[in-house]
């Protein structure tokens, strides 16, 4: 009986070796920026940061709990960081109307202003409105960090 106990002790001791645990890179997850509206919620899903010259992808998710939500209405990007606040780019996006569940609209910005000139490192805001079936309009915004 002593032999199995000694063998078990040896195995336990060997399994407690000093080898460091294997580390994996933490996944970079998207940020979900929620905004409550009178009849539901609007989420803007973006990356924590973007690289200068990268096409920015933002997903707008409309999720009414009652009635309908329509948007994004009049979306634009404004510079809101190092260089002050100024409108940079207007988008021509067809808004959607959501009556139940949720639906997404993707906004792609190639980091150019309305004149087609490339813009640089700054904090930008994606801004748009949504409207519900009672006519209540809510302005939604999400920060886009470009470094």
Image (cartoon, rainbow, N blue to C red):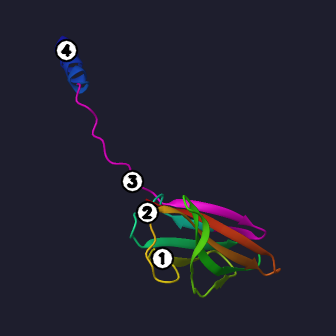
Please say if the residues under marks 2 and 1 sit with CB atoms less than 8 Å apart: no
- Find numbered disc 2 in the image and state the secondary structure of the residue it sits on: loop
Work out how far the residue at label 2 is from the one at label 3, CA to CA, in angstroms: 16 Å
Q: Which residue is mark 2?
A: 50
Q: Which residue is drawn at the image coordinates 53% and 72% (left, top)?
A: 59
Specify whether 109 is left or right of 42. Answer: left
Q: Is residue 37 magenta?
A: yes
Q: What is the C-alpha distance between the residues marked 4 and 1?
A: 67 Å
Distance from label 3 to label 1 (Cα)?
24 Å
Q: Is residue 138 left or right of residue 102?
A: right
- Residue linked to disc 3: 27
Mark 1 — residue? 109
Left or right: 127, with 38 as reference point: left
Residue 40 lies within the magenta run? yes
Residue 65 visible here: no
Residues shaded magenta = 18-42
Which sits earlier in the primary sequence, circle 4 or circle 2?
A: 4
Q: Residues within 10 Å of mark 4 (few under 14, many from 20)?
A: few
Q: Which is closer to the viewer, label 3 or label 1?
A: 1
| Image quadrant containing the N terminus | top left
Find residue 6 and name its label. 4
Residue drawn where x is 50% and y is 62% of the image = 122
Q: Residues within 10 Å of mark 1 (few under 14, many from 20)?
A: some
Of the numbered discs 2 and 3, the one sitting upstream in the chain is: 3
Q: Position of residue 86 (x, y in %)?
A: 61, 70
Residues at circles 3 and 1 in contact by the CB criterion of under 8 Å: no
């Amino acid at each position: 009986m002593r032999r199995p106990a000694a063998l078990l002790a040896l195995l336990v001791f060997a399994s407690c070796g000093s080898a460091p645990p294997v580390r994996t890179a933490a996944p970079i997850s998207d940020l979900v920026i929620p905004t409550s509206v009178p009849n539901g919620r609007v989420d803007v899903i973006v990356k924590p940061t973007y690289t200068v010259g990268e096409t920015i992808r933002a997903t707008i998710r409309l999720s009414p709990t009652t009635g309908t939500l329509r948007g994004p209405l009049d979306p634009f990007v404004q510079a809101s960081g190092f260089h002050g606040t100024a409108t940079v780019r207007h988008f021509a996006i067809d808004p959607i109307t959501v009556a139940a569940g949720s639906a997404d609209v993707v906004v792609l910005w190639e980091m150019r202003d309305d004149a087609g000139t490339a813009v640089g490192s700054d904090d930008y805001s994606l801004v748009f409105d949504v409207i519900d079936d009672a006519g209540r309009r809510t302005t939604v915004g999400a920060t886009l960090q470009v470094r």
